[in-house]
Image (cartoon, grey):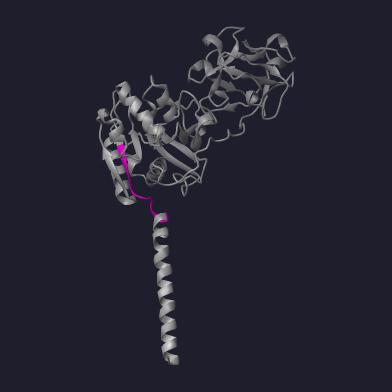
Amino acid sequence: MTTLSRTLRTTAVLVAAVLALLLARTPTDSAQAAAAPFRVWVFSKTTGFRHDSIPAGIAAIRQLGQQNNFTVDASEDDTRFNDTNLAQYAAVIFLSTTGDPVVTQAEKDALQRYIQRGGGFVGIHAAADSGYNWPWYGRLVGAYFKQHPTPQNARVKVEDPNHPSTQGLPAQITRFDEWYDYRANPRPNVHVLTTLDESSYSGGTMGADHPNTWCQNVDGGRSWYTGMGHTIESFSEANFLHLLLGGIQTAAGAVPANCAVTTPPPPTGRQIVGTSSGRCATVQNTNGSQAQLADCVTGQAGQSWTATTGKQLMVYGNKCLDANGRGTTNGTQVIIWDCNGQPNQQWNVNSNGTITGVQSNLCIDASGQGTANGTKLVLWSCSGQANQQWTLR
């Protein structure tokens, strides 16, 4: 064999090796760029309030499917909740379902078996306003709807920037929507992805810790929920569609995600310190717990108060300082109760050091001018005494 022939043969072998390497890498790279194909069912039946954004939501999810390699079926036929039909889907999407759309116990049992066999669930907005008499569903969605103020702009904060649904989003997004409060804070049971900054809008009652998008591993399956998506316009917003796509892909199991329970954040509020006692207003995490003086302990949840734009003093994330029984007379106990936006839970923190009830115009008072641990706090006519003066620090 001549030197030229050997050179040509060596070159051909090298070229073939490079081509083989490139071909071998291509499927892997493609798999990373797009999830494997799968099928989802968008279920949007309502037996309560019906959102006019449902058609826009279905259209948007269909388009996401076309762009991202998954098939979308849409039906409001609840009889399709059976083992045979559900088996074809990687995830079922509850799009603003309200009331009790999964009607029979057999249908409910089928959905539960589907999740237990590793199925996926996506809840959008009013999916939390559904299934109130079905405790298992409450665990699946993560929390039940409680109330909402008038739709308005609010600031959404990304808590986990590494989840596929939030990865690449701005750390904070101001957008227009209907902002849900929930009957209980879901954080102890879910992995929180985004929270609401209640200082950025009016009418929120959950306090400093207000999750509104989360995921969880539940009963053998996967669940992802967002409280956003009330408006038609939501389903043409790039950031919301990015969030939704990641939720669908991870709930379907097509893209891996960490949905382990989130560790509660440290308290972010301030202590209410009595001027005469040097002790802190303290409560137990129970409705009806009367505020009392106790030695101040940095970071103690029962002493960490957040003053909201709605004039509430919040503690434990969803409870508010409250004039017991909506009382407006001397001696009314100062307690905590689930935040409800009522005037007996609104307070003026005044420049002279007093804290007065908006409804009663009475001062928070350390009973009997007490300074010892355990001294109860009550409402009393403002007198200018030191036992009615407080510092937020």
Magenta span includes 34: yes
Task: Name the image quarter holding residue 380.
Answer: top right
Nearer to the camera, 20 or 254: 20
| Residue 35 location (% of width, % of height) | 38, 50
Res. 86 visible in picture: yes
Nearer to the camera, 218 or 20: 20
| Residue 123 location (% of width, % of height) | 38, 34
Q: Residue at x 42, y 63 (%)?
A: 25
Q: Is residue 356 left or right of residue 45?
A: right
Res. 43 visible in picture: no
Query: Image height check: is 22 above or below 358?
Result: below
Task: Name the image quarter holding residue 370.
Answer: top right
Query: Image height check: is 171 above or below 77?
Result: below
Magenta span includes 111: no
| Residue 373 location (% of width, % of height) | 73, 15
Image quarter (top left, top right, bottom left or bottom right) of the C terminus: top right
Q: Is residue 258 left or right of residue 271?
A: left
Query: Image height check: is 362 above or below 101?
Result: above
| Residue 150 location (% of width, % of height) | 39, 28
What stretch of residues is rendered in magenta?
32-41
How many marks the image carries: the answer is 0
Image quarter (top left, top right, bottom left or bottom right) of the N terminus: bottom left
Task: Name the image quarter holding residue 138.
Answer: top left
Nearer to the camera, 154 or 386: 154
